[in-house]
Image: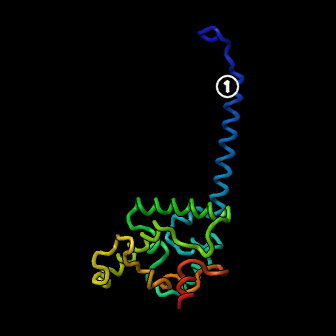
Amino acid sequence: MSEEGAPCDRGGIRARGVALALLGGLALGVGAFTFHYAEGLSYFSTDPAACTNCHIMRPQYDSWLKGSHHQAAGCVDCHLPVAFLPKYLAKASNGWHHSKGFTLENFHEPILIKPGNSAILQENCLRCHGELVHPLLAGARTDRDAVSCVHCHAAVGHGESAGLGGPERGEQAERTQHE
């Protein structure tokens, strides 16, 4: 009996502890297997080939190999912040969205950059080419209708056709229709 006079249920406590340990072990095992299967450690590197772990990114990688920035910049140079903490926060966010989208197959085709990642890309363009384009920008970096490097230079990083095929959608299709 316990101090209050109620009987102790040590067997029930042990059974719950064992069940929780089994569930935790199962979750840890499935997570470790998935991390290993998805080559999770490769995403901590700066190797552009890590982006091809998902077969869906192969066209972007192949077009980058043929693109003008191949010798000068890898994926992380353009698509991630330079500072340590923002870089790994962006990697974590992108990893979550990519794994969810590719697993559930509910991503936009062709793949489109999200607004936050577009801002990172813009900052990295300016970090490398700022001296050259500074007179063109003259403070128009944060306005809603600010000059965007990829507006005119969309093919620089990945070439003209970096999708998996299928119909073009969005701004590129609209530009093509009006030309």
Front residue of 138/44: it is 138
Q: Residue furthest front?
A: 178
Do we see residue 64 in this rendering? no
Give percent across and percent down for residue 135: 27, 83
- What colour-coding does the image apply? rainbow
Q: How many marks?
A: 1
Q: Which residue is mark 1?
A: 13
Q: Residue at x 66, y 57 (%)?
A: 34
Using the image, determine if residue 29 lies above or below residue 118.
above
**Which image quadrant: the N terminus?**
top right
Q: Residue at x 66, y 37 (%)?
A: 21
Residue 169 shown left or right of residue 12 in the figure: left
Give percent across and percent down for residue 129: 35, 81
Tag 1: residue type? Answer: Ile
- Picture quarter containing residue 86? bottom left
Give percent across and percent down for residue 137: 31, 80
- Picture quarter containing residue 2? top right
Using the image, determine if residue 70 lies above or below residue 6.
below
Q: Mark 1 Cα within 10 Å, few/some/many (few <14, many 20+)?
A: few
- Picture quarter containing residue 125? bottom left
Do we see residue 102 in this rendering? yes
Give percent across and percent down for residue 140: 32, 75
Q: Residue at x 34, y 73 (%)?
A: 141
Front residue of 20/99: it is 99
Q: Residue furthest bottom?
A: 179
| Element class at badge 1 | helix
Q: Residue at x 53, y 82 (%)?
A: 158
